[in-house]
């Protein structure tokens, strides 16, 4: 699973070597890592609804790996941005504080950090399942901010961001529809 | 054979040229699609001959002229200009063309002419991107008359000593090197002198993000990203963006007394 999730990264590195990233490779790498982060995050959110709707158990087993891969790509996305701006803290700080487009992306990444740190079975036990689950609801905020970041990053064609937002909305609805039934 | 290097003119930059392969495959030309590679892939079918240009509006001598004839009136000049895209990347482009001023003077602007409006070809048959409404077609741009008459302002017909590639705006495009790239309208079919400021495509599409003037300005950020630095295509790392894209000495006087944060 993890190995499979790293295939796009290998592809990205190979493309960078052969020049297949095009005339603006940094921009392309930024876009691809960002897309991968958001797509993997949405896939991790699809695991639970998929399990309950289908009765399969495998989605639950891959959920953690998907979430961690999403975090890894988001972190890589941020690192590329950081290096692209010459690691100048002033410029990055100004971006984070003054430009909502960057702010929401940054907040989404920060929200994912505690989730990645507490992703092990040991951490679930240490926190207790209820507290752990409450903490991990932050993933919805991270995904929503990620989709907003994507939307604001586009100059004109909003098809991609719209697909991401609709997918997120559908996943939320899937849970909401199921939730009362389980409580009764 | 390699052409002998010519001496640089007063408006030329000595910076290394963007590799031709990159300058002709990384383009913003929404008439062909939103992807940077779409224009190079799809522009082959554009018929650039015959091509008629109309010059009308506030002129004493309106013209409707075949482009070949129009070109014969002027001696092509070489101009190596920086090109800065509003998205934060830039290129160095060796254009061939003639000053817009030479053409405008031929049409004899009246005393009422204050602005120049440019209109690109509108033909959804040839421009797949015009079959959708991602922008209001046709693409229109505009300049103040003094900007249009400035010697830096070029009508380009060639690149790298060859005919202008279709994806770069053939057969006739505007080049205004101190403004963001979207001002430099491609595939021009009509030039209209007007009394009032003409509408421009991007300022209509997103008025809070793209103004009429669109002068390259590192001090005025785009609402969503900083304009302080740029990625020079073909090079590594970002470099500082210069006021008026490095042409401040030539054009800053045009904007004396104007608040460029308001007139962005």
Image (cartoon, helix red, strand yellow):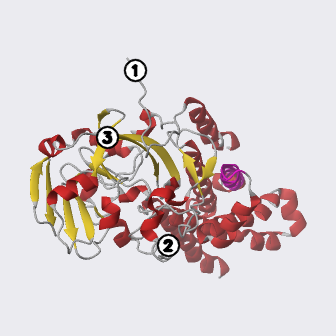
How packed mark 3 is, by other alpha carbons closer than 10 Å (few <14, some 14-19, many 20 or more), is: some
Q: CA distance from mark 3 to mark 1?
A: 19 Å
Residue A144 position by quadrant: bottom right
> Which residue is label 3 attached to?
B77
From where the camera sits, is residue B90 visible?
A: yes
Q: CA distance from mark 2 to mark 3?
A: 31 Å
> Which residue is label 1 attached to?
B2
The image position of residue B244, as x and y in percent, is 49, 59
The image position of residue B24, as x and y in percent, is 39, 39
Residue stretch rendered in magenta on the structure? A65-86
B22 or A56: nearer the viewer: B22
Q: Quadrant of the N terminus of chain B?
A: top left
> Which residue is label 2 attached to?
B260
The residue depicted at 29 percent of the width and 43 percent of the height is B97
State yes or no: residue A72 in magenta. Answer: yes
Question: Horizontally, is B108 left or right of B87 in the view?
Answer: left
Q: CA distance from mark 2 to mark 1?
A: 43 Å
Of the two numbered discs 3 and 1 in the rendering, the one whose residue sits closer to the viewer? 3
The image position of residue A131, as x and y in percent, is 82, 73
Disc 2 with disc 3 on a shared chain: yes
Residue A94 position by quadrant: bottom right
The residue depicted at 40 percent of the width and 20 percent of the height is B2
Question: Horizontally, is A183 left or right of A170 in the view?
Answer: right
């Amino acid at each position: 699973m993890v190995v499979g999730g790293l295939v796009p990264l290998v592809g990205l590195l190979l493309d960078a070597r052969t020049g297949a990233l095009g005339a603006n490779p940094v921009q392309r790498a930024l876009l691809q890592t960002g897309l991968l982060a958001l797509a993997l995050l949405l896939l991790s959110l699809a695991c639970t609804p998929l399990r309950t709707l289908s009765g399969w158990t495998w989605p639950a087993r891959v959920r953690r790996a998907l979430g961690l891969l999403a975090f890894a790509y988001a972190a890589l996305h941020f690192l590329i941005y950081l290096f692209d701006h010459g690691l100048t803290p002033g410029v990055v700080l100004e971006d984070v504080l003054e430009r909502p487009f960057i702010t929401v992306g940054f907040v989404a990444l920060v929200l994912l950090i505690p989730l990645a740190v507490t992703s092990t079975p040991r951490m679930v036990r240490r926190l207790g399942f209820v507290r752990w689950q409450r903490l991990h609801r932050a993933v919805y905020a991270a995904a929503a901010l990620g989709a907003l970041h994507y939307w604001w990053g586009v100059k004109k064609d909003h098809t991609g961001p719209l697909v991401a937002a609709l997918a997120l909305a559908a996943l939320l609805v899937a849970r909401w529809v199921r939730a009362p039934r389980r409580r009764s | 054979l390699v052409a002998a290097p010519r001496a640089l003119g007063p408006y030329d930059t000595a910076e290394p040229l963007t590799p031709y392969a990159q300058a002709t495959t990384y383009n913003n030309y929404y008439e062909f699609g939103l992807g940077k590679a779409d224009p190079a892939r799809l522009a082959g079918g554009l018929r650039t001959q015959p091509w008629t240009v109309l010059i009308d509006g506030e002129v004493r001598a309106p013209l409707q002229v075949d482009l070949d004839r129009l070109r014969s009136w002027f001696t092509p000049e070489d101009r190596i200009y920086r090109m800065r895209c509003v998205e934060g990347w830039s290129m160095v482009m060796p254009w061939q063309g003639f000053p817009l001023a030479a053409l405008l003077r031929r049409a004899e602007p009246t005393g009422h002419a204050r602005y120049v409006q440019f209109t690109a070809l509108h033909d959804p048959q040839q421009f797949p991107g015009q079959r959708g409404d991602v922008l209001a077609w046709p693409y229109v741009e505009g300049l103040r008359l003094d900007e249009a008459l400035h010697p830096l302002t070029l009508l380009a017909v060639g690149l790298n000593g060859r005919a202008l590639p279709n994806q770069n705006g053939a057969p006739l495009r505007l080049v205004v090197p101190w403004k963001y790239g979207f001002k430099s309208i491609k595939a021009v079919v009509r030039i209209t002198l007007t009394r009032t400021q003409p509408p421009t495509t991007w300022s209509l599409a997103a008025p809070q993000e793209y103004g009429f003037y669109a002068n390259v300005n590192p001090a005025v950020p785009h609402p969503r990203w900083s304009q302080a630095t740029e990625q020079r295509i073909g090079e590594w790392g970002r470099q500082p963006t210069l006021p008026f894209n490095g042409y401040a000495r030539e054009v800053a006087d045009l904007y004396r007394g104007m608040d460029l944060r308001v007139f962005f």
